[in-house]
Image (cartoon, rainbow, N blue to C red):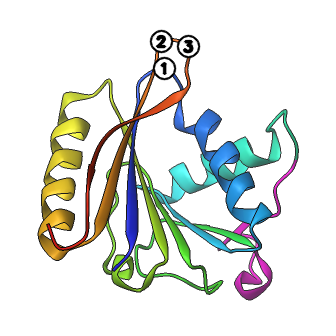
Amino acid sequence: MARIDFYHLQRSRLEEVLPRLLTRVLQTGERALVVAGSEERVEDLVQALWNDRDGWLPHGSRRDGYAEEQPVWLTEDPQDNANGAGYLFLCDGSDSTLVEGMERVFDLFNGLDEASVAQARERWRQRREEGHALRYWQQSADGRWVEKASANAGV
């Protein structure tokens, strides 16, 4: 079973949070798969990674090609693990059956949108029933991440 971390974005946008999380994954030598809600959103995130002020992250999308060479692969296809990633980032309410084979999953959702929050709660319930180890993170007033809840595998 995968460890799944739910990130409730309230003070920062996905474009600000994603590069920091991806940097940490790449520092461990792992590969990441980022699933976004549409092809246009993928390209928005590609641009955000190119323009990240904290540094450049090696990444690509279908438009770039060479998926197997990309440490970070961005796609709108929830089954497209073309770079063989072990870490999965689900954005914009995306979901994927690839969760089962991942080492770790990051479910990043817009905490300012009630529909997104409701969908994330449903994904949490489903993942808990499947037996995954869950963590729920929320931003504090100063923008730091604070773990607010967890559910252990098998609970």
Which residue shows up at 40% across the image and 73% down it?
Answer: 78
Q: Quadrant of the N terminus?
A: bottom left
Q: Amino acid at mark 3?
A: Asp
Residue, disc 1: 11
Precedes in sequence: disc 1 or disc 2: 1
- Between marks 1 and 2 in the image, the one whose residue lies nearer the viewer: 2
Q: Badge 2 is on which residue? A: 141
Q: Amino acid at mark 2?
A: Ala
**Residue 73: x %, y % from top left:** 65, 70
Quadrant of the image for the C terminus? bottom left
State the extent of the magenta-drawn residues as a range.
Answer: 56-70
Asked whether, in this view, residue 87 is left or right of residue 4, the answer is right
Measuring 32% from the left and 51% from the top, which residue is drawn there? 93
Q: In the image, what residue type sits under mark 1?
A: Arg
Secondary structure of residue under mark 1: loop
Are discs 3 and 2 less than 8 Å apart at CB?
yes
The residue closer to the viewer here, 9 or 113, is 9
Can you identify the residue that label 3 sits on? Answer: 142
Residue 17, how many percent across, how many down?
60, 38
